């Protein structure tokens, strides 16, 4: 499922679609965990790091969780996503979560939808993502992903 850059819906059922000023407000209140979900290639060696050919920029303070918004992630990636959300929120499913990627990118929509399905109550989706943030001239920082999950078999698609 590599066709993740295409127009996305206008909103997300059960979550809140936010624009750049709304993201700034959430961040200034210190009540949101920003999660960058840009895709990143994996090494074919078990336990090896990601294959990052260029630096990526993210909203300051974000956590980069690559590939959690893919259309058909493997079971290991889904379990890793759930564990990362558990860690980031300290188990509080009422914590505000902000999912973003690039503009016209299904990865952030899919990740936000998965968080809602996991029972997170305050999910925000930023459809213009880092592109909208940078177009507004706002500060960024270099993104660094955490260690990847172990590889697993692909699943049947449940999202675009």
Image: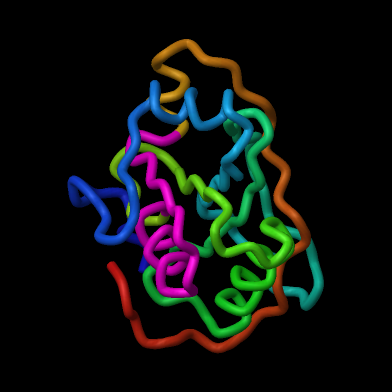
All told, the count of numbered labels is 0
**Left or right relative to 142: residue 19:** left
Does residue 63 show up magenta in the picture?
no
Asked whether 146 or 91 is in front, the reply is 91
* Render colour scheme: rainbow
**Residue 134 spot, x, y in % from top left:** 46, 20
Report the residue at 49% width, 45% height from top: 98
**Left or right relative to 144: residue 106:** left
Asked whether 55 or 115 is in front, the reply is 115
**With respect to residue 95, does 120 lie above or below?**
below
Looking at the image, which residue sits at the far right? 47
Report the residue at 49% width, 23% height from top: 24
**Residue 158 spot, x, y in % from top left:** 32, 79
Quadrant (top left/top right/bottom left/bottom right) for the C terminus? bottom left
Magenta part of the chain: 108-129
Residue 75, by quadrant, is: bottom right
Looking at the image, which residue sits at the far top? 137
Asked whether 143 or 55 is in front, the reply is 143
**With respect to residue 157, does 59 lie above or below?**
above
Report the residue at 37% width, 87% height from top: 156
**Residue 48 spot, x, y in % from top left:** 80, 67
**Residue 61 spot, x, y in % from top left:** 68, 34
**With respect to residue 93, does 40 lie above or below?**
above
**Left or right relative to 97: residue 54:** right
**Left or right relative to 133: residue 4:** left
Residue 153, by quadrant, is: bottom right
Residue 58, by quadrant, is: top right
Report the residue at 56% width, 29% height from top: 27
Quadrant (top left/top right/bottom left/bottom right) for the N terminus? bottom left
Does residue 113 show up magenta in the picture?
yes
**With respect to residue 79, does 38 lie above or below?**
above
């Amino acid at each position: 499922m590599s066709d993740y850059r295409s127009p996305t819906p206008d909103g997300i059922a059960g979550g809140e679609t936010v624009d750049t000023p709304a993201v700034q407000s959430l961040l200034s209140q210190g009540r949101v965990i920003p999660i960058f979900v840009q895709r990143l290639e994996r090494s074919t060696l078990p336990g090896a790091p990601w294959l990052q050919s260029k630096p990526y920029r993210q909203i300051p303070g974000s956590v980069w969780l690559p590939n959690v918004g893919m259309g058909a992630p493997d079971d290991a990636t889904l379990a890793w996503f759930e564990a990362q959300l558990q860690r980031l929120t300290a188990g509080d499913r009422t914590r505000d979560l902000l999912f973003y990627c690039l503009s016209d990118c299904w990865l952030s929509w899919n990740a936000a939808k998965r968080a809602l399905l996991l029972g997170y109550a305050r999910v925000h989706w930023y459809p213009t993502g880092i592109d909208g943030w940078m177009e507004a001239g706002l500060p960024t920082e270099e993104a660094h992903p955490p260690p990847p999950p172990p590889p697993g078999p692909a699943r049947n698609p449940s999202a675009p």
